[in-house]
Amino acid sequence: MSRNEDTTKRNVLSFINGREPSIDRRFRPCPKNIFKAIDIDNIDELDDDSNSNFDDASTVSGDISKTSTIGEDGAMVYLRLRPVNSPSSSYKIAGNGNTLVVNPRLDQTTTSNNKAAMEKHFTFSAIFDNNDSQKGVYNKCIGDKIKLEESFTVLTYGTSGSGKTFTLLGDDVNPGIVPRSIENIFTLYNSNIYPHPAVKLQNARVVILDDELLAKEIISTRQVLTACGDITSVHKQLQQIICSDHNFETTVFDDVSVMIWVSFVEIYNEFVYDLLELSASNQTITVPSRKNLKIVSNDGKVFVKGLTQVYVKNSLEALKLLRFGLQRVTYASTSINSNSSRSHCIFIIDVLKYNASGLITEISYKFCDLAGSERLDKTGNVGSRLKEAQRINTSLMILGRCLDAANNLNRKKSTEVIPYRESKLTMLLQAPLLGKEKIAMVVNVTPTEKYYEENLNVLGFSSIAKNIIFKPPIVKQNNSRFSFFLEYSKAGSAQNAYIEQLLEENILLRSDNDRLINEVNNFQIRINSELLRQEKEIRNELVDSFEKTLTATKEQAENRLKQELECQKRVFESKLAKSSDGECLVI
């Protein structure tokens, strides 16, 4: 290769002019100190399709509002740094506040050719530090997504103890993403929520519930909500905090009825469990009484067969179900976190909107709290804890492979297959992984030297998620005619109240009917028991009478035989006497 050709190639592939991986779409160069760890003579070994650490570590940066499809069509990836007493100097926020600069550790020389000793830049949609509250996290991560009425999935990812669960759920004073989303959803549809579960997603299909099924769903919902316990005071406190932080608006939809269903799933050791099932054990360990559910795909839609779905009419009921399911999540103590979640949990809210024209819109919100990912030598796990950690790391590795495959499909337009079937977690997240739903990932990092290696893995994992391209949502039209929705929406308040009264009376009549049937069955059982008892008594009396009669007859027969024997004896003696007298005369 000539000197001119070598110079030309360096100009094309250098870290100043190249687009991959260190230059963003606004053509801003990387920091100068990165050249200290780069051997320019070997730069031709990198290409645009390289899968090296640079490609994974350097993502597109720039103004979020002006960048290409990341904010509108791609995954939104956020970073949240957990507040610590002694943060490491290896982590610095640069750029417009959305780039995390990770410097090499002190024991790594910057003059070597080792890629691990280089300064790395990770760009996110936004970065949250100590100054950002739960309100700010929700506004940037969720914001107006619920108002847009598009299905989306929220993932919290990071090592154990990095604040994933706090970001997603929060506490009684600082509510997280899920409680705020619940309040936002029910505020949005407040005036259009249908009073009864008339339509339901069953096996990923919308079905109409007849009177019998509707009554069963209402009774089942009441049973589950009764088992949840009363949290009215806690809900009022959270509602006041959320309403003071946000100004959620209520949208009135003409001729639209909204039905909201809630379900809660746990994936523990690659087993899928229903957290809202009444018969499930309240213990926090795997017990035989919990039933492993099956994940099924129907016409490209994934669902959990036999999963409990509860119809909710307000945010209080949804929050009850959330807390009820959290009591059954599998937790355990490790050397990193004394109360570490050992499973992946997915809280699902399905919104069904029926339009009078016949259109049914399905909107699904999934909130996934991923289990912590860390190296086994840091946790000190043994036995069952070790098995749990291995399953967790395997499922997260497969999730990373799926994101990487989706990234390669977008960049190379190849025919690579996304391996979402290799894990239960990725099977449930099939829709966002295939680009059918939008996805938002909140990466949680503890900025200390202790977790330096784990943080690099977490950051590298999240850096490839932003290239997933989403397709526009599909609005399906139901072929059946549900005219009662239109009649209900057009009817006056008096007629609506009358309809609700009839439905309540129908439920009461069904309950009375079931009670009467049970009473008749119990009465029939008592009658049968009484008949059996009387039959036994009569049988015993007959047996006793027969035995007495048999004994008397036997005695009479014995007496008669004795009398006959006496008669025969006298006859024999008489004949014997006569025979003796004749012999004497002959002599």
Image (tube, rainbow, N blue to C red):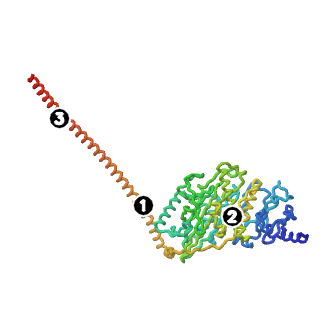
Q: What kind of residue is marked 2?
A: Cys
Mark 1 lies on residue = 514
> How many numbered dots are placed on residues in this image?
3
Q: What kind of residue is marked 1?
A: Asp
- Say whether residue 454 is left or right of residue 198: right
What residue lies at 31% left-to-right and 49% top-to-bottom?
535
Cα distance in 3D space between marks 3 and 2 = 109 Å
Q: Which of 62 and 104 is in front in this view?
A: 104
Mark 2 lies on residue = 402
Q: What kind of residue is marked 3?
A: Glu
Report whether residue 242 is seen: no
Residue 240, picture quadrant = bottom right
Mark 1 or mark 2: whose residue is earlier in sequence: 2
Q: Is mark 1 on a helix, strand or loop?
A: helix
Residue 527 position within the rendered picture, expressed as x and y whole percent measured from the top left: 34, 53
Q: Is mark 3 on a helix, strand or loop?
A: helix
Mark 3 lies on residue = 564
Residue most toward the bottom? Answer: 357
